[in-house]
Image (tube, rainbow, N blue to C red):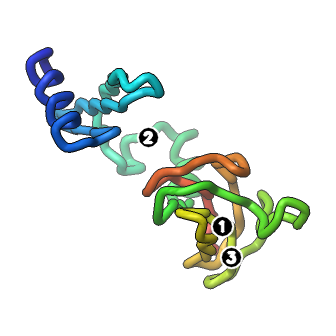
Amino acid sequence: MNVKELKEMIALMNENGLVEIEIEREGLRVRIRKGVSGVPEITQEKYIIQPTGVASLSPAAKEAAPSETKRIEIKAPMVGTFYRAPAPDAPPFVEVGSDIEPGQVVCIIEAMKLMNEIKAEVKGKVVDILVENAQPVEFGHVLFLIEPA
């Protein structure tokens, strides 16, 4: 990606009143986000797509791979603020190691003053909680890792 293309992306943002834009092309991802001052901040990631087959892994990695691939992500279905509990003084819906059932509430995302319950879609065990309480999240942000039962 060259400077001309970056300037075009910034112009597109300004024309349409966008705060953030992300473009992915040929193994390169560029995200432009307006900072607090209104000045665009540019980040870029370069990544290489590798085969996901277990056959290409070392013997030690083959043993670890099945548990890694079985994990399911619970992602934020909307932009908002993540809450682990129904109230500040209440216990969290789930902790690491908690067993969950389909339909069980795992967290709340507040969006536009509305509290939206996020429910599990699978039966399993919470392996990791990737978001801190009261942290803002974006659509698609991974909230939990679940090991299915």
Disc 1 from disc 3: Cα separation = 8 Å
Residue situated furthest top in the rendering: 3
Residue tagged 1 = 108
Direction from residue 122 to residue 31 in the image, left or right: left
Q: Position of residue 22 (x, y in %)?
A: 28, 39
Direction from residue 41 to residue 60 in the image, left or right: right
Disc 2 from disc 1: Cα separation = 38 Å
**Count of labels in the image:** 3
Foreground of the two, 105 or 18 = 18
Q: Amino acid at mark 2?
A: Leu
Check the picture and name the quadrant holding the C terminus: bottom right
Q: Amino acid at mark 1?
A: Ile
Residue tagged 3 = 105
Q: Position of residue 75 (x, y in %)?
A: 51, 60
Q: Residue at x 62, y 58 (%)?
A: 144
- Say which of marks 2 and 1 sits in front: 1
Check the picture and name the quadrant holding the N terminus: top left
Q: Residue at x 51, y 61 (%)?
A: 76
Residue 27 vertical placement versus 82 (above, below)? above
Q: Are marks 1 and 3 in contact (CB under 8 Å)?
A: yes
